[in-house]
Image: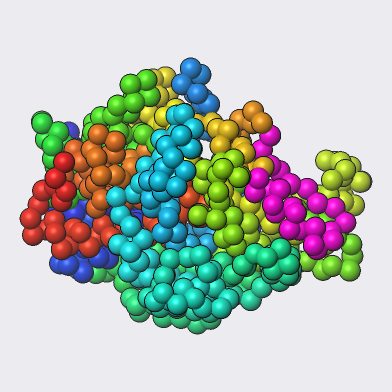
């Protein structure tokens, strides 16, 4: 029999960025909050302390800071007619676990979505006609605008101590920033980080092509900083251990460094770790949640009653919890009805590697996760699909998060994969090469979705989440187009050799190769309950006291990293709960 805990105002599932933001905002409003985190408690000291954290074998091979796949994972297949198989080894994406979640091991790239990203379907149809969209493409407009979220983008940047240069402030362009972005009310809290060699050369190559390079907005502090919550950050020292690792220097923004110091010990907030949430409990008519059932640190089944349930887990597992709990109607790809699992999307990531002679000293071991240079000349409204052949857009960027022998060294074309020639090629490449990444948007499709697997169960007896996803022609064409543009630009730098990894026609999604952790969709926000799981405030259309902020809410993915948008949506959701829902519980948007 389950242990029934004392009822609370709010229960939050997951303590990454979204969970930490909601906990801070709702306890500020006087609500009692219980946060349930499936992993261990983590903090800079002792978990990310030097020299313990800078261990490539432990962090990048053994995946110490990532989710354990032997208890809970997903199954993957390319199409609805195939049998899915479990994701047993970290490859394509890296879900986090423990306090901080993926927000502790991310790189730090912190973009705002473009204004046009919010209205992509209506803009495409109004500019080019309805026939511009390929058959089966399921993209939708967001039910919010850039202007709605601008204050929340701003707040998240100031909490994170984001380093960058705004290109448009109060409608006026600012030299050195991104001229194509939405208007900011003020500049970033810190100036851009210093550039490494590849980023300096990116400026040269991009400008010679007539492009408009600007510093990547990076939540890696370029100087000492105290955020609005009173949390202190120190300047990044280019240690090269951002991606896959927690920050030893209080330099990379994370829930652990930027929000948790305020929450820990706060009256009205309780954090329970090693708490595996199994399901959201619903009333008989399934119109309201009564709380959640979870396994506590001793493995005992417990029930946490609550007036409000917030799902703040990693995108995939928010969708999984909705499906196993019976919240809403699962998506059916044959009838295109139902909303839970609909519009799964990913990120279209490629790379161009450049190799030089010994006169070019590019130390790949040093690095900063989000620092570097990028451009938007191929993104958003700058991409004309009638000329490029694809819907969406993308960025080319110079970014060096740090490399090392255990993490792998890219070698020049023609170098074998083993033996003395490989050793020689690796030595030459480590000191005299760098790469530019080509990151594109990923549209959503009728046949790309999440569902419950009929064959496999997790360690807790629940069906695993099943991912049905493959690359479509639109994303393959985008990959080829963007990589070609990047290589054309890179010729200005006169490398000895260059290689790109554009997707070939007929390419299939490879679950074994890391691409990005930017998994999106599955419980999307929209204006119509027939085509979306959540309303504009991230509130379930079906269960009014359940809110599900996160990348699961994206109807499709744009060309940027999703974290900035995820944080803004979390603050937007918190504002709605504080200012509307608490005073008048019930649907915030009438269906």
Quarter holding residue 177: bottom right
Q: Nearer the viewer, residue 155 or 149?
A: 149
Q: Which residue is most to the top?
A: 81
Placement of the N terminus among the 4 image quadrants: top left
| Lateral position of residue 477 relative to residue 139, left or right | right
Looking at the rendering, the stretch of residues picked out in magenta corresponds to: 481-504
Q: Which residue is most to the right?
A: 420
| Lateral position of residue 363 relative to residue 187, left or right | right
Residue 200 forms part of the magenta stretch: no
- Name which residue lies at 37% across and 20% down: 334
Placement of the C terminus among the 4 image quadrants: top left
| Lateral position of residue 508 relative to residue 113, left or right | right
Residue 491 position, x and y percent, is 80, 58
- Name which residue lies at 15% across and 51% down: 588
Q: How many marks?
A: 0
Residue 194 position, x and y percent, is 63, 76
Residue 124 position, x and y percent, is 44, 45
Q: Nearer the viewer, residue 273 or 567?
A: 567
Q: Confirm whether residue 72 shows in the render.
A: no
- Name which residue lies at 51% across and 65% down: 180
Residue 325 position, x and y percent, is 25, 33
- Name which residue lies at 43% across and 66% down: 182
Quarter holding residue 336: top left
| Lateral position of residue 16 relative to residue 68, left or right | left
Question: Measured along the vertical axis of the image, is residue 98 above or below residue 68?
Answer: below
Q: Which residue is most to the left?
A: 584
Question: Measured along the vertical axis of the image, is residue 4 above or below residue 333?
Answer: below
């Amino acid at each position: 029999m389950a242990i029934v805990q004392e009822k609370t105002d709010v229960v939050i599932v997951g303590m990454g960025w979204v969970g930490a933001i909601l906990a801070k905002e709702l306890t500020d409003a006087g609500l009692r909050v219980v946060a349930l985190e499936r992993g261990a408690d983590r903090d800079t000291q002792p978990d990310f302390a030097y020299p313990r954290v800078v261990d490539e074998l432990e962090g990048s091979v053994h995946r110490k800071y990532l989710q354990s796949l032997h208890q809970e994972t997903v199954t993957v297949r390319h199409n609805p007619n195939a049998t899915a198989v479990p994701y047993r080894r970290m490859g394509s994406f890296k879900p986090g676990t423990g306090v901080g979640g993926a927000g502790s091991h991310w790189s730090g790239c912190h973009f705002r979505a473009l204004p046009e990203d919010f209205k992509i379907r209506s803009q495409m149809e109004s500019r080019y006609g309805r026939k511009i969209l390929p058959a089966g493409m399921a993209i939708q407009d967001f039910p919010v605008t850039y202007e709605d979220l601008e204050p929340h983008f701003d707040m998240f940047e100031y909490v994170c101590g984001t380093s960058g240069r705004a290109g448009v402030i109060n409608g006026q362009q600012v030299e050195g920033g991104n001229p194509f972005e939405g208007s900011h009310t003020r500049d970033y809290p810190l100036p851009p980080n210093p550039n490494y060699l590849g980023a300096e050369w990116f400026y040269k190559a991009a400008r010679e092509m007539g492009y408009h390079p600007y510093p990547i907005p990076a939540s890696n502090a370029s100087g000492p900083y105290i955020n609005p919550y009173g949390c202190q950050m120190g300047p990044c020292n280019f240690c090269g251990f951002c991606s896959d690792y927690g920050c030893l220097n209080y330099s990379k923004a994370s829930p652990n460094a930027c929000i948790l110091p305020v929450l820990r010990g706060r009256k009205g907030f309780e954090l329970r770790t090693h708490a595996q949430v199994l399901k959201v409990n619903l009333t008989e008519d399934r119109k309201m949640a009564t709380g959640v059932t979870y396994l506590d640190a001793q493995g005992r089944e417990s029930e946490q009653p609550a007036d409000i349930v917030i799902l703040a887990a990693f995108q995939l597992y928010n969708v999984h919890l909705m499906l196993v709990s019976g919240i809403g109607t699962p998506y059916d790809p044959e009838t295109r009805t139902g909303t839970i699992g609909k519009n799964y999307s990913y990120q279209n990531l490629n790379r161009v590697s450049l190799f030089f002679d010994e006169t070019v000293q590019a130390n790949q071991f040093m690095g900063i996760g989000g620092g570097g240079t990028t451009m938007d000349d191929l993104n958003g409204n700058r991409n004309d699909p009638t000329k490029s052949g694809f819907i969406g857009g993308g960025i080319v960027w110079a970014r060096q998060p740090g490399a090392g022998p255990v993490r792998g060294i890219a070698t020049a074309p023609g170098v074998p994969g083993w033996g003395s020639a490989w050793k020689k090629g690796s030595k030459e490449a480590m000191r005299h090469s760098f790469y530019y990444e080509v990151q594109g948007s990923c549209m959503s499709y009728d046949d790309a979705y999440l569902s419950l697997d009929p064959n496999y169960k997790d360690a807790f007896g629940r069906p695993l989440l099943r991912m049905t996803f493959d690359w479509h022609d639109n994303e393959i064409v985008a990959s080829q187009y963007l990589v070609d543009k990047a290589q054309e630009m890179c010729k200005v730098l006169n490398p000895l050799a260059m290689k790109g990894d554009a997707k070939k026609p007929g390419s299939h999604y490879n679950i074994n190769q890391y691409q990005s952790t930017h998994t999106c969709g599955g419980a999307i926000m929209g204006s119509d309950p027939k085509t979306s799981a959540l309303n504009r405030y991230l509130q379930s259309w079906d269960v009014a006291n359940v809110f599900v902020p996160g990348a699961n809410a994206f109807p499709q993915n744009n060309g940027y990293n999703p974290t900035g948008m995820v944080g803004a949506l979390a603050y937007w959701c918190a504002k709605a709960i504080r200012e509307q829902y608490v005073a008048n519980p019930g649907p915030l948007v009438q269906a």
